[in-house]
Image: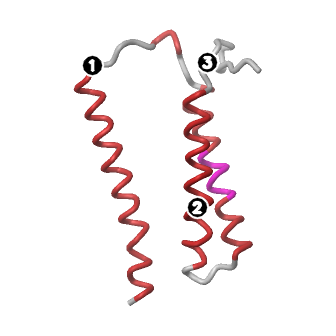
Amino acid sequence: MRWGNRFGTPVDPVPFLVVAAFGFLFCYTFGPSYLMAFGAELAGGLGYSTMAFLAVTGLAYYRFVWTARPELRSEIPARFRIRRIVLGGLVVAGVFALLSLPLLHATV
């Protein structure tokens, strides 16, 4: 299957597939157990996890396939790459911290 953006230009599907796979992993690993900690049933937790996974997959497709512009690709300087990695790590740590706050309150 040939992947193309909205203009029909061929696009590398690997970034989309990686983000979708990690979205699946994250949503189905943490979603049901997190929601069950608040009293939701397993079916409800799986349903909400499925909706979150579909949203992540849709956003990843839009970002990495549909609006991709391969003709604009160029070398990015190392200082910008490391800054982006550090900021991404801080965002992930912040999301995990925010997700843990209700669980800490629920166990006290």
Q: For residue 31: magenta?
A: no
* Mark toward the start of the polypeptide (1 vs 3): 3
- As for residue 53 lying within the magenta part, the answer is yes
State the predominant SS element of the stretch in magenta: helix
- Other-residue count near label 3 (Cα within 10 Å), few / some / many at <14 / 14–19 / ≥20: some
Relative to residue 60, is residue 95 depicted above or below?
A: below
Quadrant of the rendered image containing residue 38: bottom right
Instruction: Please state, as top left, top right, bottom left or bottom right, where the C terminus lies in the image.
Output: bottom left
For the residue marked with disc 3, what is the amino acid?
Val
The kind of residue tagged 2 is Thr
Q: Residue furthest right?
A: 1
Q: Secondary structure at mark 3?
A: loop
29 w.r.t. 71: above or below:
below
Residue at image mark 2: 29
Q: Which residue is mark 3?
A: 11
* Residue 95 picture location, percent across and down: 40, 58
- CA–CA distance in space, label 2 to label 1: 35 Å
Q: Which mark is residue 25?
A: none
What residue sits right under mark 1 in the picture? 77
The disc, 2 or 1, on the residue closer to the chain's N-terminal end is 2
Q: Please state which amino acid type lies under the numbered disc 1.
A: Pro
Residue at position x 69%, y 13% from top?
A: 8
* Residue most extreme to the bottom: 108
Q: Residue at x 70, y 72 (%)?
A: 44
CA neighbours of label 2 inside 10 A, class few (<14), some (14 to 19), many (20+): few
Q: Nearer the viewer, residue 25 or 52?
A: 25
Q: Secondary structure at mark 1?
A: loop
